[in-house]
Image (cartoon, rainbow, N blue to C red):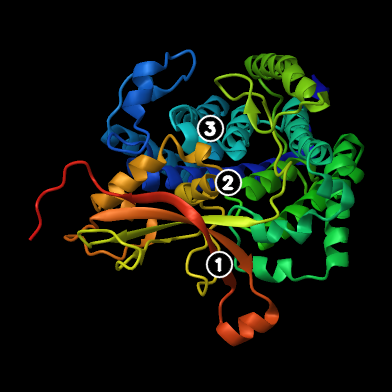
């Protein structure tokens, strides 16, 4: 079947696969370095407890068969190793079936992690990586030209990512329709980056232009992905440029990078493809079967997109084969932050020696300038942003976090930028307070050197101690 392959997209596939392997590598590295205090055996939301309540069919995972922290670490670091091998092009050195199996390994491992990750892995880019990673298994390697159907399905995912995000904005916060959302968003986004302060202080007319351009990129440009070349290449390139703008303006984990990666197969790079034999019959059957399955399953995200009650970032099956996407249907006008403090005083008073814990990415000390962490995902920092929006987001895990701080738990403290207490002298009490944060003005920045100004709002958690504490001298 001559229509089955598209040799002109040989280089597009190569660039896409190497970029996707890089995203996989970051995802597995994040899991390997953070899982113990979050979902480990002594984590805030332990995997063993989840597995005891969840059947395999609802959360398929290799950890349903066996779980220990050591086994999880082995899986995560194996994912890192396989991702690095894919980024180096090992799949191209294998037979077609061998390359497909190699791409299947990180998908199975990361699916296993996401399905036991609970709140910490409930982000849209987790499902997006799995949906794209599953298709990558069937994209082939140097032994066959890229299959047209898989290239089309990758564009279909990109269309749903962008168009779904555009629709949720138009249906959501009125500021998107008034073109005023970026008057607030750079200040109230989950984790600002080093340039976010400057983006916030851009002239308001330019913010209107940014929002209008976003609507064009998300609601009009995605349709052009299904037009002939070079229009499809121009559309994908414009999406990449928009994502790079978002990379500069904030820390959105690997959301922007996986979206950029997803746009690459739609670009036809100028090159001369090598001559290869036609694809084997078994490969054609496999691709046709998978394509038919995914197109049939797509009716659920399509129905969600056209619904007035559109839902963001939802998976429609436990394998995350098709999902709905979207972000920032509502934009906050005020930024609140939960600040954690501890004291060694025997009796906690307002004038006690309260010392503040500093997080790696989320705002804390008003004089500390935000750093760039994306595509690395600081999961605790992100959830602290949600906790400031509503205590309901914090209910499953916040109490466990405070308990770990009272214990000076080593793994938990590694998630933080710094602890004010030495390892052998944990605090007697920990409390949480809610502050309003706002960006300083140019004048305030020059006078104080602080990029934030914060104001106490209320107590978030009163001074808390462990139920049983060893006697201290």
Q: Is residue 409 at least partly visible in the picture?
A: no
Q: For label 3, count other residues whose C-alpha is less than 10 Å away and answer few (under 14), some (14-19) or many (20+).
A: many
Q: Is residue 110 left or right of residue 425?
A: right
State the residue at coordinates (56%, 77%): 450
Q: Residues within 10 Å of mark 2 (few under 14, many from 20)?
A: some
Residue 276 in the image: above or below residue 210 = above
The span from disc 1 to disc 3 (Cα, nearest Å) is 47 Å
Count of labels shown?
3
Q: Which residue in the protein does label 3 denote?
A: 103
- Sooner in the amino-acid sequence: mark 1 or mark 3: 3
Give the image quarter of residue 155. Answer: top right
Q: Viewed as shown, does residue 299 lie left or right of 72?
A: right
Residue 208 % position (x, y): 87, 59
Q: Which numbered disc covers residue 389?
A: 2
- Residue occupying the point 48% across, 12% down: 57
Q: Can the viewer see residue 389 in this picture? A: yes
User: Which residue, given by chain and number where applicable, does mark 1 sit on?
Assistant: 454
Quadrant of the frame with the N terminus: top right
Percent x, y of residue 218: 83, 43
User: Which one is nearer the viewer's eye here, 155 or 468?
Assistant: 468
Q: Earlier in the sequence, mark 3 or mark 2?
A: 3
């Amino acid at each position: 079947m001559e229509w089955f392959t598209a040799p002109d997209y040989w280089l597009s596939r190569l660039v896409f696969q190497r970029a996707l392997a890089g995203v996989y590598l970051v995802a597995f590295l994040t899991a390997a370095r953070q899982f113990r205090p979050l979902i480990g055996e002594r984590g805030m939301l332990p995997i063993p407890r989840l597995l005891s309540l969840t059947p395999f069919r609802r959360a398929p995972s290799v950890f349903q068969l066996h779980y220990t922290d050591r086994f999880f670490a082995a899986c995560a670091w194996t994912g890192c190793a396989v991702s690095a091998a894919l980024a180096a092009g090992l799949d191209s050195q294998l037979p077609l079936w061998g390359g497909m199996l190699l791409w299947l390994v990180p998908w199975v491992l990361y699916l296993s992690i996401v399905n036991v990750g609970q709140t910490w892995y409930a982000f849209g880019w987790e499902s997006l990586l799995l949906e794209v990673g599953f298709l990558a298994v069937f994209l082939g390697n140097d032994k066959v030209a890229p299959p047209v159907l898989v290239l089309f399905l990758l564009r279909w995912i990109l269309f749903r990512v962008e168009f779904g995000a555009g629709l949720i904005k138009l249906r959501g916060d009125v500021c998107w329709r008034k073109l005023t959302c970026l008057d607030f968003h750079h200040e109230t986004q989950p984790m600002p980056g080093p340039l976010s302060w400057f983006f916030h202080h851009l002239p308001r007319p330019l913010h209107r232009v940014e929002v209008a351009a976003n609507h064009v990129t998300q609601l009009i440009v995605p349709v052009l992905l299904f037009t002939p070349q070079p229009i499809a290449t121009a559309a994908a390139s414009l999406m990449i440029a928009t994502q790079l703008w978002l990379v500069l303006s904030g820390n959105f984990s690997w959301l922007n990078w996986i979206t950029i990666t997803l746009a690459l197969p739609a670009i036809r790079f100028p090159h001369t493809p090598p001559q290869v034999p036609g694809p084997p019959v078994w490969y054609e059957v496999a691709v046709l079967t998978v394509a038919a399955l995914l197109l049939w399953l797509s009716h659920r995200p399509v129905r969600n997109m056209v619904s007035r009650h559109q839902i963001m970032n939802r998976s429609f099956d436990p394998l995350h084969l098709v999902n709905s996407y979207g972000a920032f249907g509502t934009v906050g006008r005020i930024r609140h932050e939960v600040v954690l403090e501890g004291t060694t005083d025997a009796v906690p008073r307002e004038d006690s020696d309260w010392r503040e814990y500093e997080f790696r990415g989320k705002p804390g000390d008003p004089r500390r300038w935000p750093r760039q962490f994306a595509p690395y995902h600081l999961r605790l920092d992100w959830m602290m942003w949600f906790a400031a929006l509503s205590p309901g987001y914090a209910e499953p895990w916040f109490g466990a976090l405070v308990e770990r701080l009272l214990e000076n738990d080593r793994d938990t403290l590694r998630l933080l930028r710094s602890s004010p207490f030495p390892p052998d002298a944990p605090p007697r009490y920990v409390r949480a307070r809610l502050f309003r944060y706002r960006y300083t003005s140019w004048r305030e920045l020059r006078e104080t050197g602080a990029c934030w100004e914060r104001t106490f709002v209320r107590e978030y958690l009163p001074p808390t101690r462990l139920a049983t504490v060893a006697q201290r001298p």
